[in-house]
Amino acid sequence: MLNKSNIPKHIAIIMDGNGRWAKKKGLPRIMGHRQGIERVKEIVGACKGLGIDTLTLYAFSVENWKRPRPEVNTLMRLLEQFVKRELNSLIKNDVRIKVIGRIDELPENITRLLKETEFITKDNKSLMLNLALNYGGRIEIVDAVKAILKDVLKGSLNATDIDEEVFSSYLYTAGIPDPDLLIRTSGEMRISNFLLWQISYSEIYFTHKYWPDFRRKDLEDAIGEYIKRERRFGGI
Ligand code: FPP
């Protein structure tokens, strides 16, 4: 039985396999991404319904710029459409949107839209939806180190006071508890530069389903598997 006391508070998902899903069906890759958006909507609704506090979705990595220009443009357009079309529903459902990643390097209209959306939804409490966009786990750590150095040089932070908690507070995810469960779809068994610091003790769940085939029931299966695991955090 899934209930509030045993479900993960924070779920992170590497949504993978849109391209292969489309190829298998003889469709252009963009159709995989379109179908992927449908699953984003379904899984956001499911998380809200289950009482999950935080959902973090890996939507665009710093490495994804290497993709052909038309595909990058399509992903940006889909993201823009998603945010614009879903805003009212997100507000109605009390969902807070936060972007993690180098947001200022995205196309200017997208950066503006995302910042506005973060502002409009900042007081919503039912579900926190983190979109990892232009995100890389290593660059996040490098950015944190730079910000820490700046504060140390300025004198507002003492080098001897730096510990794990202080370091975490300089990450894009400052103030957000670490993921309890990390899900990756499509059968690949890699972390792909996602939340390197934050997933130290996360349970990891891999499924062969491509992201466009990942339904509410699959999320429930992943949570069911999570509940069965015994988390020891290095203890016995
Ligand atoms: C992986 O499939 C998916 C992505 C790189 C992007 C995921 C993006 C979306 C579902 C749409 C935008 C997201 C939001 C939150 C609005 P792939 O293209 O790597 O598939 P492949 O590995 O089969 O080629």
Image (cartoon, helix red, strand yellow):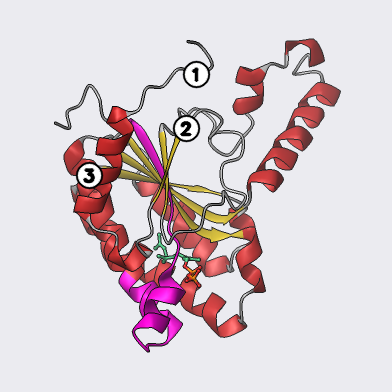
Rendering coords of residue 123 (x, y %): 33, 36
Query: Whole-Å distance between the Cαs marked 2 and 1?
Result: 9 Å
Query: Whole-Å distance between the Cαs marked 3 and 1?
Result: 23 Å
The residue that label 1 is drawn on is 233
Per the rendered image, the range of residues in magenta is 8-35
Identified by mark 2, the residue type is: Ser
Question: Residue 167 vs residue 124: left or right?
Answer: right
- Relative to 176, say whether 115 is above or below: below
Furthest toward the left, the residue is 1
Rendering coords of residue 54 (x, y %): 36, 37
- Relative to 209, say whether 90 is above or below: above
- Asked whether mark 1 and ligand 1 are closer than 8 Å, the reply comes as no
Rendering coords of residue 102 (x, y %): 62, 53
Identified by mark 3, the residue type is: Glu
Q: Quadrant of residue 145?
A: top right
The residue that label 3 is drawn on is 220
Crowd class of label 1 (few under 14; some 14 to 19; many from 20; radius 10 Å):
few
Can residue 166 be seen by looking at this rendering?
yes
Disc 3 secondary structure class: helix
